[in-house]
Amino acid sequence: MKSMTGFGRSEIQDQSTGIIFTVEISTVNRKQLEVRSNLPREMSSYEPIVRKLVGNKLKRGAASVRVEVTKSSVALNNSIHINKKVA
């Protein structure tokens, strides 16, 4: 990363389940590294992983990571199964 101030947003849809994951990251200049995450309750156990992934890319600055999970009409009609090996 060339600048400590920035914003990024990405979205991906799982075609088999219709679940849409949206991730937004914003950063500002700070002397130390500070990572804040806003994850859905069902994903709260992934917070340490998010912090580690961000920490591997940034050495300093304040980073805010927001993850949103939504369901398309396909997902509303199908049951959801979590593949724990893949997760």
Image (cartoon, helix red, strand yellow):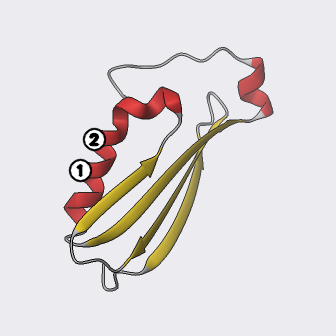
The amino acid type of the residue labelled 2 equals: Pro
Please name the amino acid that badge 1 sits on: Lys
The quarter in which the C terminus is drawn is: top left
Q: Quadrant of the N terminus?
A: bottom left
Rounded to the nearest angstrom, the CA distance separating label 1 from label 2 is: 6 Å
Name which quarter of the figure residue 85 lies in.
Answer: top left
Badge 1: residue crowd in 10 Å (few <14, some 14–19, many ≥20): few
Q: Is residue 24 above or below residue 29?
A: above
Specify whether 61 is left or right of 80. left
Q: Is residue 76 above or below residue 23?
A: above
Foreground pick, 54 / 28 = 28
Across and down, in percent, residue 79 comes to 66, 14
Q: What label sits on residue 67 in the rendered view?
A: none
**Would you say the residues marked 1 and 2 are in contact, meaning their CB atoms lie under 8 Å apart?**
yes
Residue at the image point whose x is 35% and y is 40% from the top: 47
Give coordinates of residue 32: x percent, y percent.
Answer: 21, 71
- Residue, far bottom: 2
Residue appearing at x 45%, y 56% in the figure? 65
Give the label on residue 48, or none: 2
What secondary structure is found at the residue carrying circle 1? helix
Q: Residue at x 33, y 58 (%)?
A: 35
Q: Dot 2 surroundings within 10 Å: few (below 14), some, or many (20 or more)?
A: few
Q: Is residue 24 above or below residue 16?
A: below
Question: In the drawing, does residue 26 fall left or right of residue 77?
Answer: left
Q: Residue 39: percent from the left, percent from the top?
A: 49, 41
Quadrant of res 62: bottom left
Q: Residue at x 61, y 29 (%)?
A: 16
**Residue 52's mark?**
1
In this orientation, which residue lies closer to the viewer: 44 or 32? 32
Check the image and name the residue furthest to the front. Answer: 31
